[in-house]
Amino acid sequence: MAAYVIVDNEITDQALFADYAREIVAVTEAHGGRYLVRGGATEVV
């Protein structure tokens, strides 16, 4: 069964997010997940 997750978040604690960012890819892949698209810099027009 496929599931798609779309997240739009605001980072309020940069140190905590850095810990999360270091670990989340390995956790996602360990459970069979994969990224179709990952964000980067954005510009609101």
Image: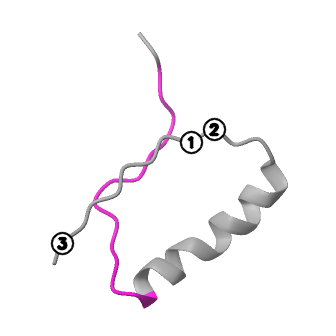
Q: Main secondary structure of the magenta part?
A: loop
The quarter of the picture where residue 20 lies is bottom right
Query: In what quadrant of the picture does the N terminus appear?
Result: bottom left
Q: Using a 10 Å C-alpha cutoff, classify the residue at mark 1 as few (fewer than 14 neighbours), some (14 to 19) or many (20 or more).
A: few
Single out the residue that lies furthest toward the top.
45
Q: Which residue lies at the image location 41% right of the left edge and 83% below the top edge?
A: 29
Horizontal and vertical percent position of residue 7: 44, 48
Cα separation, mark 1 vs mark 3, equals 23 Å
Single out the residue that lies furthest toward the bottom.
30
Horizontal and vertical percent position of residue 27: 52, 82
Q: Using a 10 Å C-alpha cutoff, classify the residue at mark 3 as few (fewer than 14 neighbours), some (14 to 19) or many (20 or more).
A: few
The residue that disc 3 covers is 2
Residue 45 vertical placement versus 11 (above, below): above
Q: Which residue lies at the image location 57% right of the left edge and 72% below the top edge?
A: 24
Q: Given the image, on which type of amino acid does mark 2 rest?
A: Glu
* Callout 2 secondary element: loop
Q: Who comes first in sequence, dot 2 or dot 3?
A: 3
Is residue 37 covered in magenta? yes
Q: Given the image, on which type of amino acid does mark 3 rest?
A: Ala
The residue that disc 2 covers is 10
Which contiguous range is marked in magenta?
30-43
Residue 23 vertical placement versus 4 (above, below): below
The quarter of the picture where residue 30 lies is bottom left
* Callout 1 secondary element: loop
Q: Which residue lies at the image location 75% right of the left edge and 67% below the top edge?
A: 19
Left or right of residue 10, residue 31 in this image: left
Instruction: Using the image, tell me which numbered label, if any, was put on residue 9.
Output: 1
Q: Given the image, on which type of amino acid does mark 1 rest?
A: Asn
Cα separation, mark 2 vs mark 3, equals 26 Å
Q: Who comes first in sequence, dot 1 or dot 3?
A: 3
Q: Are marks 2 and 1 in contact (CB under 8 Å)?
A: yes
The quarter of the picture where residue 12 lies is top right
